[in-house]
Image (cartoon, grey):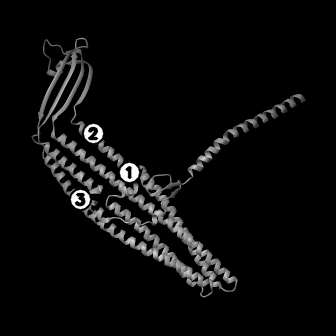
Amino acid sequence: MAWRKLGMRYTFKRCTKIGLQATSLILLNLIPGMLVLESAHASDASPLKLTLRDAVQMALKQNPQVQISNLEFAQSEQDKKIARSSLLPTLGATVAETAVRSNFEAFTGKPIPGIPKQIGPFQTFQGGGAFSMPLFDLTLWRQLQASNYAMSATAAQSQTTREQTTLLVVSQYLGCQRAAADIKAAQSRVELAETLYTLAASLQENGVGTGIDTLRANVQLQNEKQRLMVAETESKTGIYGLAHLLNIDPEQKIELVDTISFFETPVTDVDRLLDQAYKARPELRAIEARQQALRKQRQAASAARLPSILAQGMWSYYGLSIPNSIPTYQYQVSVSAPLFTGGRISAEVAKIDLELKKLDQEMQELRNVIALQAKVSAAQLEAARNEVEVANLGLKLANETVSQARDRFEAGVANNVEVVTAQDDLARANDNQINALYKYNQARADMARAFGQIEMLYSK
């Protein structure tokens, strides 16, 4: 019994030791995989660095609205193929084995003496092909031409979607740049407010300053921290909106690269672009293509009054069975013309005429809108450039005011009311500069959109 217990104890220890060794081996094999997964997760957490051009190009590939417009264009291509197939010959093949048994009295309506009631049964076999092809059908030809113009209209509409998506992405990216500039300016003001608060507290400790100066400086510091938090929240919100336009994971971190270009104000030649506005806008091309498509549809409707020529035929083996079948065929050319359609053709033509008049009104309205957008965006761009120059000068003067007020307060010549006032002026000057820069960049994008050049300007 003692030996048995000793053996069981030895077996348990040995199994425990083997189990520990197996667990160690499993952990050693899992650790590299866990490290790989951790490194992969770390790589996924790395921010996506985007320039404005990268953001536009990504949106033109991934944005759902752009993808839908591409699918609509693909559908128009298939519609064109369907219209073209109506003018091409159609071929078919048939193989049939038929068994027939019929009642003769059902055909005559009464029995006939000497003729049996039953007919059959008998079998027939038929196998062969048939074809059909329009030799002359002006309606089908006009419908094919209309489908060509419809595809052109869809292509222009797809380009319109791309232009609109580009404008949305550019505006969102500019908004994120403005939020980043707000954060940078707010951080700078927080650092300045902390320095002035430390200076006020130091002067109070040395008996030079007063408690109200320290309290006033602390209030100003808290105000600047509050502005910094607001700017950070707006930046996060803008990044989420940009991720939505790019159709990427909202958890993906995005880092803006073109922060310096936000402060650049290149000169744009407005006069050179004004002559290209009507030619470049895809909306105008879409309406023109729709007009051409409707004109072809009108011609197709009118051509329905004309005769059409159709060729048909069939060739097959036909007989009571396969061995005794013989070649048979039938060919015909038929001419058909409508004599009375109940006013359908006239109504179709009148309906298309009404659609053409509607498109004429849309065309005129769109031309007026484009002219308005071009003039307004050009005026806003020029005004924004002047605002940027004034705002830059105002920011420079505000920094000088803060510096002088700080020196006067530190020298004990004045209290920090001047410093706080100068800080408020500096914050206002920062806001003015950032808003002016945002207006300029947005006006530049709006003008490019008005002239149909926004995709070329921001994605090439």
Q: Is residue 230 visible?
A: no
Q: Is residue 160 visible?
A: yes
Q: Residues within 10 Å of mark 2 (few under 14, many from 20)?
A: some
Element type where label 1 sits in the image: helix
Residue at image location 62% in from the left, 47% down from the top: 38
- Classify residue 439 as left or right of residue 361: right
State yes or no: discs 1 and 2 in contact (Cβ < 8 Å): no
Who is closer to the viewer here, 183 or 407? 407
Q: As shown in the figure, which amino acid type bears the numbered disc 3?
A: Met
Residue 68 image offset from top left, x and y in percent? 37, 49
Residue at image location 23% in from the left, 59% down from the top: 363
Question: What is the spatial separation of the Cα atoms under label 1 and label 2, in whole angstroms?
Answer: 23 Å
Who is closer to the viewer here, 87 or 16? 87
Query: Label for residue 66?
Result: 1
State yes or no: discs 3 and 2 in contact (Cβ < 8 Å): no
Residue 92 image offset from top left, x and y in percent? 25, 27
Residue at image location 46% in from the left, 66% down from the top: 263
Task: State the residue position of label 3.
Answer: 363
Point out the image quarter for the N terminus: top right
Q: Residues within 10 Å of mark 3 (few under 14, many from 20)?
A: some
The picture quadrant where one finds residue 334 is top left
The picture quadrant where one finds residue 119 is top left
Picture layout, residue 248 above or below residue 368 = above
